[in-house]
Amino acid sequence: MDMVGILYATLVVGVVGLAIGVLLGIAGSVFAVTIDEKEVQIRKCLPGNNCGGCGYPGCDGLAHAIFTGEAEPNACPVGGAAVAEQIGNVLGVDVKPAEQRKAFVQCKGSYDTATLDETGHKICAYGCTGCGQCAETCKFDAIHVVDGLAIVDEEKCVGCGACAGACPRQVIAMVPKLAGHMVACSNPEKGKAARAVCRNACISCGMCVKVCLAEAISIETGVARIDENKCTGCGACAEKCPMKSIM
């Protein structure tokens, strides 16, 4: 190729590149999404963990939902009262802090207390398998698998609920941060059948129901359940439980 051909090819490439740049610039201006400054301010208030505990796709999604009124200003479980107040100031409204929550593992079947099969796996079909999916999902290092059982570090838990959503057995519940006693079992089987798979399984004996003066406990689908709105935290149920499945 002679020099003229090279110059011509270079010129053509340059012109095409310039044209594409201009077109992209025009397209960017035409299709640009305008974000309200107030929405930007709301986003700055959010912690940026993008944990999804609010039910929206990350902090950007929540900021937009709060701005449009789809979500409450106190919807961020990680930020808590402090972030809710900041967002309230941006919106010019008074915001009541949402109830803080924590993850609670409804199982007490570690390798020491649960019955294992010949391969070393727990035979209970309802409890924690120790798979670790909850720990992998938690962005706050608040849950770990110890001796085959998920354990929650309440000081680190922010109540985002990611672990509960990841648990294949659905044995992690989100409960009030200040919850008193809870039943650490999800096995609906009764008596001998429940005891055969775990030494800490609720056997539906009803002893906890009998000693609760606040009438806060009932047996539902084979497992004792505590109504936190009625529970006084006296501890009589935990003390009386023969299986020690109440924590």
Image: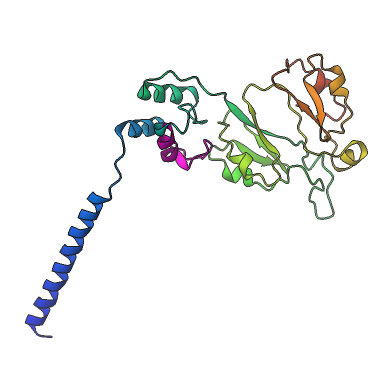
Q: Position of residue 39 (x, y in %)?
A: 35, 33
| Residue furthest out toward the left | 4
Does residue 87 appear anywhere in the picture? yes
Residue at 81%, 55% (x, y): give it: 119
- Choose top left, top right, bottom left or bottom right for residue 205: top right
Confirm whether the magenta stretch covers residue 87. Answer: no
Magenta span has 59?
Answer: yes
Point out the residue furthest to the bottom here: 1
Question: How far across and how far down the image is residue 167, in percent?
Answer: 66, 44
Name the residue at 88% across, 37% down.
190
**Residue, far right:** 192
Question: Does 3 sit left or right of 153 as displayed?
Answer: left
Q: Position of residue 173 (x, y in %)?
A: 67, 34
**Quadrant including the C terminus:** top right
Q: How is the image coloured?
A: rainbow
Does residue 90 appear left or right of residue 176 in this picture?
Answer: left
Residue 180: % across, % down: 70, 21
In the image: residue 131, left or right of residue 84: right
The image quadrant where one finds the N terminus is bottom left
Residue drawn at point x = 87 percent, y = 33 percent? 203
Does the image show residue 154? no
Q: Which residues are magenta?
A: 47-66
User: Where 236 sits versus 73, above or below?
Assistant: above
